Image: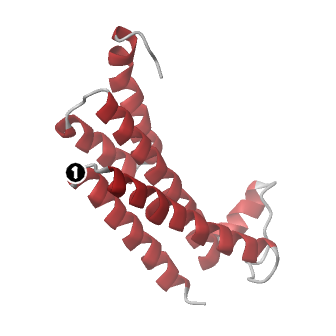
Amino acid sequence: MDWNFVFSAVNVLALIAWVALIALPRWPALLSALTYLGVGLLCLIYAVCLIAVLSGFIPAGEGGADFTTIQGVRSIFASDVGVTIGWTHYLAFDLFVGLWIARDADAKFFSRIVQAPILLATFLAGPLGLLIWLIVREPYARSSGRLR
């Protein structure tokens, strides 16, 4: 299998989804499409590749698929399939978190100008963007009497 193609395809899918999330109006149909055609499709690609590796259908590298040791994880990421699976995992979860941030920020009436750099940070460095959002949203959530 051409893992460069799969890697490129998941990158393009994620990039399109992020541009749509940041730049387009947040119509319910768009948010649903980003959830199912963006996050859902990334999750499907991840699951198929992961199951194929764990079942032995696709070789995972010299050490096999071992998540119990750092050496085993290093071995997985030493292969193109391992890197592609890991990267797809990051892309799916970061997009899911970005969707949550956008919906939460919209519900709390944060402007898109405030949201854009936080979403961009989430796209580029997932947990950093999430941390920034948690810090930014906390005073508003506390003042409104709800931390949901």
**Mark 1: secondary structure:** loop
Nearer the observer, 60 or 32: 32
In the image, residue 142 lies at what x, y percent? 39, 11
In the image, residue 121 lies at what x, y percent? 33, 45
- Say which residue appears at 41% left-offset and 28% top-offset: 134
- Say which residue appears at 66% left-offset and 67% top-offset: 47
Density class for disc 1 (Cα within 10 Å; few <14, some 14-19, many ≥20) is: few
- Say which residue appears at 35% left-offset and 12% top-offset: 144
Picture mark count: 1
Would you say 58 lies left or right of 33 here? right
Nearer the observer, 102 or 135: 102
In the image, residue 48 lies at what x, y percent? 67, 73
Residue 77: image quadrant is bottom right
Instruction: Please state which amino acid type lies under the numbered disc 1.
Output: Pro
Q: Is residue 137 above or below residue 35?
A: above
Residue 130 appears in the picture as rendered: yes
Q: Which residue is mark 1?
A: 25
Nearer the observer, 79 or 5: 5
